[in-house]
């Protein structure tokens, strides 16, 4: 083989090992845990329409994003909205109800049809 071919093979092997190492670290338990001081919102949209998702609290209404039908959405709640009282999540006609959140919490918000059957649960 030519010298260039050996360099190419060596480079591909090094790249493969580096990618495998990075992937192993991301699947550990530390990656699954929310970062310190962050509240995560996991939205599951079981309706037939895309829904805008908002968080309301402390006199602030903040748009988090859109969740398409049949898709899960993952959002981070702004730190300024945590620890100042109750917050509520809204998506179309679905409401989570008022929640008292602490840094590190994960909220699972499942939007159903009809919207009044939607649920929000807090995991710590």
Image (tube, rainbow, N blue to C red):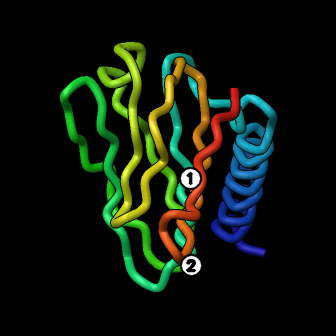
Dot 2 or dot 1, earlier in sequence: 2
Query: Which residue is at 69% across, 33% downward?
Result: 123
Near-viewer residue (101 or 95): 95
Q: Residues within 10 Å of mark 2 (few under 14, many from 20)?
A: some
In the rendered image, the vertical position of residue 107 relative to residue 111, given as above or below: above
Query: Which residue is at 45% across, 47% downward?
Result: 75
Left or right of 107? Residue 5 is: right
- How much space separates mark 2 and mark 1, taking CA atoms? 13 Å
In the rendered image, the vertical position of residue 29 relative to residue 7, given as above or below: above
Element at label 1: strand
In the drawing, what numbered circle is on residue 70?
Answer: 2
Near-viewer residue (52 or 11): 52
Query: Which residue is at 74% across, 65% downward?
Result: 9
Q: Where residue 113 sits in the image (x, y, percent)?
A: 54, 77
Left or right of 72? Residue 10 is: right
Element at label 2: loop
Near-viewer residue (122 or 72): 122
Classify the position of the C terminus by image quarter: top right
Q: Where residue 93 sits in the image (x, y, percent)?
A: 36, 65
Quarter of the view holding residue 36: top right
In the drawing, what numbered circle is on residue 109?
Answer: 1
Q: Where residue 64 sits in the image (x, y, percent)?
A: 32, 49
Q: Residues within 10 Å of mark 1 (few under 14, many from 20)?
A: many
In the rendered image, the vertical position of residue 104 relative to residue 60, given as above or below: above
Query: Which residue is at 78% across, 75% downward?
Result: 1
Q: Where residue 56 sits in the image (x, y, percent)?
A: 30, 38
């Amino acid at each position: 083989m030519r010298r260039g071919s050996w360099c190419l093979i060596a480079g591909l092997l090094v790249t493969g090992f580096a990618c495998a190492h990075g992937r192993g670290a991301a699947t550990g338990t530390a990656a699954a845990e929310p970062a310190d001081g962050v509240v995560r919102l996991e939205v599951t949209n079981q309706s037939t329409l895309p829904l805008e998702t908002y968080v309301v609290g402390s006199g602030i209404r903040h748009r988090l994003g859109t969740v398409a039908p049949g898709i899960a959405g993952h959002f981070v709640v702004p730190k300024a909205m945590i620890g100042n009282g109750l917050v509520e999540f809204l998506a179309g006609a679905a409401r989570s109800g008022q929640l008292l959140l602490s840094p590190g919490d994960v909220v699972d918000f499942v939007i159903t049809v009809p919207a009044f059957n939607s649920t929000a649960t807090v995991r710590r």
